[in-house]
Image (cartoon, grey):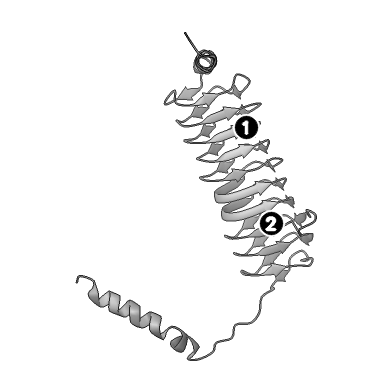
Amino acid sequence: MQTDAAAAFAAAQAQYKQTFEKHLANGVNFMSDQVWIDPEVEIAPGATILPGCILRGNTKIGAGCVVGPNSLLENTELGEGSTFNASQAYDSRLGAGNKIGPYTHIRPNTVTGPGVHLGAYVETKNSGLGQGTTVSHLTYIGDSDVGEYCNFGCGTVTSNYDGEAKHRCKIGDFVFLGCNTNLIAPVTVGDGAYTAAGSTITGEVPAGALAIARSRQTNKDGWAEKKLGAYIAKKKKLKEQQPK
């Protein structure tokens, strides 16, 4: 005699089989049946779904997309010709020709234009990114309005939360944000502006300007030699013990 849980599982499997076969007959490409697709999901003919994917809710996959492996999309639209590799997206709209992943976390209310790239360990939330903007790695974009053809250097952070309220950043078109830039919201960066690597931006950056917000380098001769003497001696001894 089947338990309630077993009966529910069997019903879910039967429904999934029907959903999978519907998409297969409609011209969707699968390399494996090791995926999960909710009944309401829409997938255009010619899209490819790789193993390990979970497609939930009102998700829509455009023609020519490649999703996976190991990806989750929930209530998210993925524009035609996009790739979505080993990443997760929730309640968002991603434009045509996007390149997402691996290991991208797209949180609710992210909207991207055509040709956007969100790479490894990038997280977005409640933000719009214009056409052609590139965010390759290790970046957080929250509560921000980003223009077209911007480049985010590695380690850029929009510091949107002050402990009491969320604030927005506004970033114009053709902006180049140097590595490890912190944008302390609310802040505006004008079109074609440039931030120097390692800067913490707290005020408006005019269009076409270079913003530098970091202290000048100071070298203290001999300081590290004293501080690291024991450490270096220990590591040199370890190196001598290694096989030649």
Judge whether 52 appears above or below 42 on screen.
below
Judge whether 232 appears above or below 129 on screen.
below
Q: CA distance from mark 1 to mark 2?
A: 31 Å
Q: Position of residue 72 (x, y in %)?
A: 56, 34
Q: Nearer the viewer, residue 144 or 132?
A: 144
Badge nearest the viewer, 1 or 2: 1
Q: Provide the residue designation for mark 1.
A: 74
Picture quarter with the C terminus? bottom left
Q: Position of residue 60 (x, y in %)?
A: 63, 27
In the image, taking residue 151 as reference, residue 10 lies left or right, namely left
Q: Provide the residue designation for mark 2.
A: 174
- Residue displayed at 64% across by 50% down: 133
For the image shown, how many numbered marks are present on the structure?
2
Kind of residue sitting beneath label 2: Phe
Q: Position of residue 77 (x, y in %)?
A: 65, 32
Kind of residue sitting beneath label 1: Glu
- Residue displayed at 66% across by 26% down: 58
